[in-house]
Amino acid sequence: MKPFFLILALSTLTLFSNNLIAQTAKSDSIAPKRLVALGDSLTEGYGVAKDQAYPSVLEAKIKSAGKNWIVVNAGVSGSTSASGPSRLKWLMKSHVDILLLALGANDGLRGIKVSATEKNLAETIELAQKNQIKVVLAGMLMPPNYGSKYRRDFEKIFIDLSKKYKIKRIPFLLDKVGGEVQLNQTDGIHPNEKGHQIVAENIYDVIKDLL
C-alpha cells in the first residue's frame, strides 16, 4: 500500500505545481492598463526629477492599491490645448485605457480666447471617446489679475465640457497647491516635490473608481 500512497502523493503534488505555474504564467501575461497624462509643464514635472512628478507619484499610489496600471507622463512644457488632438493621435499608437487631459493652463496664461480653448479640448475628448478611451478632465483656474470675467469664463470651460461629454472632472488640478509658497518652486507656478504629491492625491481621489 505504501508505494500506492507515494505515487498518489507525487501525482497530487505534480498536479498542484502545474496549476500554480499555469496561474502564474496567466497572471504574468496580463498586460498592465495604461493611463496617459496629456499635459504641459505641470505634468512633465518642470523643475523636479521625473520620478517626483505627479504621474510617477500617481502610478506608485495606484500600484500600492494593488492595481496593475502604468501612468505615462505625456507632459510637454509650453503646450497649449491646440496640441491635444495631434498628440493624442500619436499616443494612441500604444494602447490607452484612460486619458487624463491636463491642458489649458498655458492657454489662459497667454490670454487665448476661451472659445478656442474649449474647441481644442472638445476635439481631444471626442477623439478619445471615439476610440473607447475614458477621459478625466483636469480643471484649471486663472490668477486674479486676469480679471473676473476671463477667470469665470475660463473655469466654465471645464465644467461645461465635463457635463457635455459626461466625463469625470478634477475641479482644480492644483487644489491645495496653487498659491501655497511652501508647495511651489520659486517661480510660484510649478509645484515642488511636496506639491506634486498633493496633485497626485487630487487626481487619485477622482479616478480611483475607474481603475
Image: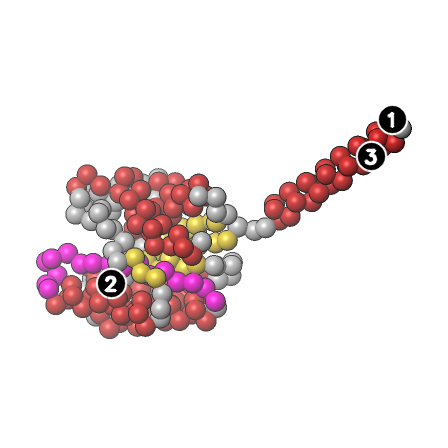
- Residue at 48 percent of width and 54 percent of height: 34
Callout 1: SS: helix
Residue 85: quadrant of the picture: bottom left
Disc ID at residue 107: 2
Q: Earlier in the sequence, mark 2 or mark 1?
A: 1
- Residue type highlighted by circle 1: Lys
Q: Is residue 202 visible?
A: yes
Which residue, given by chain and number where applicable, does mark 1 sit on?
Answer: 2
Disc 2 residue crowd, few under 14, some 14–19, many 20+, Cα 10 Å: some
Residue 125: quadrant of the picture: bottom left
Which residue, given by chain and number where applicable, does mark 3 sit on?
Answer: 8
Q: Is residue 142 left or right of residue 167?
A: left
Give the foreground label among 2 and 1.
1
State which region is magenta. Answer: 132-148
Residue 75 lies, in percent from the top left, at 36, 53
- Residue at 43 percent of width and 67 percent of height: 128
